[in-house]
Image (cartoon, rainbow, N blue to C red):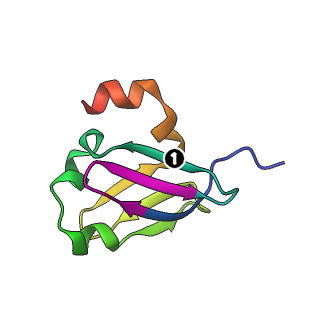
Amino acid sequence: MNTFLTGKSVRFDDRHLHVELDDGRIISTPMSWYRELQNASIRQLTNYHMICKGTGIEWPDLDYHLNIESMMSVNFQQNAA
């Protein structure tokens, strides 16, 4: 059984990063947790790729990588704020 959170798609609004998982769930976190993404252009934000068998997201224009499971971590929130 696969216990990793694997992503299917990414979208943004003015406040949140939303990641749709392969199982249909959606994880939403504040954009303020991701300074690199918060300061990026729409073109840069929409240029992403799923990496590591869907467990991560890469924004090559920003040289930024995000592990999807880290979006669920309280420690990630505290470190990013």
Does 48 sit above or below residue 16? below
Give the prevailing secondary structure in the magenta stretch. strand
Q: Picture coordinates of residue 69 (x, y %)?
A: 54, 42
Q: Picture coordinates of residue 51 (x, y %)?
A: 51, 64
**Would residue 8 be counted in the magenta stretch?**
no
Residue highlighted by disc 1: 27
For the record, the magenta segment spans 11-20
Q: Residue furthest front?
A: 14
Mark 1 Cα shell of 10 Å, populated few (<14), some (14-19), many (≥20): some
Q: Picture coordinates of residue 11 (x, y %)?
A: 40, 63
Q: Amino acid at mark 1?
A: Ile
- Is residue 51 or residue 47 the one in the foreground? 47
- Is residue 24 or residue 72 the one in the foreground? 24
Residue drawn at 57 percent across, 54 percent down: 55
Residue drawn at 37 percent across, 52 percent down: 17
Image check: 26 left or right of 2?
A: left
- Is residue 62 or residue 44 the one in the foreground? 44
Does 46 sit above or below residue 14? below
Image check: 76 left or right of 62?
A: right
Image check: 64 left or right of 40?
A: right
Q: How many dots with numbers?
A: 1
Residue drawn at 63 percent across, 48 percent down: 5
Q: Picture coordinates of residue 27 (x, y %)?
A: 51, 46
Where does the C terminus fall, quadrant-wise?
top left
